[in-house]
Image: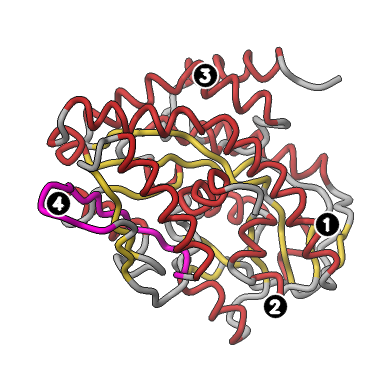
Amino acid sequence: MKSYKSAIWLLLTTSFLCIPGGERLTAHAENSKTDILRVAMLVPRSNVWVIEAKKWSDKLTEATKGRLSVRIYWGGAAGDERAVIQKMREGQIDASAISSTSLSPYVRQVMIMEAPGLFENYKQLDEVLKTLGEDFETEAYKNGFKILGWGDIGTVRILSKQPIKKITRDMRRMRPWLWTQSAMMKEFYRRIGVTGIPLEIPEVYPGLLSGMIDTVFGSAIAALAARWFTKTPYVTKESSGFITGAFVVARKRWDSLEPDVSSALHNLARKYQNDIVKDLRKMDVEAYGRILKRGVTAVHVEDIPEVQKVAKQLTDHFVGRLYSRELLDKVEKICALHRKP
């Protein structure tokens, strides 16, 4: 791990890797004057994460002069993303990392970040977030959440038990995982004639173990952290799109903090954000190399033009459903300005 900054952000941005079990951690000694921020994390508890979380909590406690510390609920102890969001709304959990997909009911047009075929490189992603981030954060706050930072955990690849050379053909004979919350994944499968197996994220690894599913979508970081790669000996060499999300605090909890405390928390998160995101992007490249070294075979995708055609159809299909035509046009213009030659 390069630094505690990248380690703690990996905790914050891999919340969708829900692995059952886990324990609660108090990252800093509590006293009667210390306010505790209850953070739900779906990654499992380990000595490495505990050490890094304590470093983060110590920084936070120092910045707030001992008035705010962190308690982490590890390993999905607070439930999956939908359960965590509900607990945040009910005041049982204060903060968590939330994927764009799960955040979309409260920031509806954020699903533009998941639109297939739009983003080809990180520069495009960064410029779109620079342009739209403030609007997304304003909408999130109106709907009950304070966004402290955006993150991404790599590019999307397909991992499978059998090689997939033509996605629009080969996936029809596979048993791919269907994330029940993803309207885009459902529509993509429908358009290429694939029947997906609906599972929540905590059920993916058991599904691979049992043979219920044999194909998953995810980044190399996800595949490595969740050990999906151990049951999927093939991965697509080409990747498409990015997995994005945000670290959020329940608005009521945020508003309950003293102004100087919330300011310290906000500044600390923003201070490290750029370096952390850069570290994670390097880590995704490294994770891809690691799974290849561990025996996973990279497969060249031969029907990219056909997949891109379906992606364009999907992007247009969701206009008026998940985002507006105006927003799509704006994002397409930004992406066009930063498309690599």
Q: Residues within 10 Å of mark 1 (few under 14, many from 20)?
A: some
Real-space CA distance between mark 1 and mark 4, rounded to the nearest whole angstrom: 47 Å
Q: Residues within 10 Å of mark 2 (few under 14, many from 20)?
A: some
Q: Is residue 298 left or right of residue 276?
A: right
**Foreground label between 2 and 3:** 3
Residue of label 4:
91
Q: Give the mark nearest the N terminus, 3 or 1.
A: 3
Residue 201's place in the image compared with 308, above or below, is below
Tell me whether the residue at label 3 lies in contact with that at label 1, contact meaning CB atoms closer than 8 angstroms.
no
**Foreground label between 1 and 2:** 2
Disc number for residue 231: 2
Residue range (magenta):
29-45
Q: Residue at x 47, y 57 (%)?
A: 16
Between residue 76 and residue 341, name the one nearer to us. 76
Between residue 235 and residue 265, name the one nearer to us. 265
Quadrant of the rendering where the N terminus is positioned: bottom right
Residue of label 1:
166
Tell me whether the residue at label 2 lies in contact with that at label 4, contact meaning CB atoms closer than 8 angstroms.
no
Q: Give the mark nearest the N terminus, 1 or 4.
A: 4
Real-space CA distance between mark 1 and mark 2, rounded to the nearest whole angstrom: 20 Å
The kind of residue on which mark 1 rests is Lys
Between residue 83 and residue 214, name the one nearer to us. 83
Real-space CA distance between mark 3 and mark 1, rounded to the nearest whole angstrom: 35 Å
- What secondary structure is found at the residue carrying circle 4? loop
Residue of label 3:
130
Real-space CA distance between mark 2 and mark 4, rounded to the nearest whole angstrom: 38 Å
Residue 22: image location, x then y, percent: 39, 74
Q: Give the mark nearest the N terminus, 2 or 4.
A: 4
Q: Give the mark nearest the N terminus, 1 or 2.
A: 1
Q: Residue at x 66, y 20 (%)?
A: 335
Residue 305: image location, x then y, percent: 82, 39
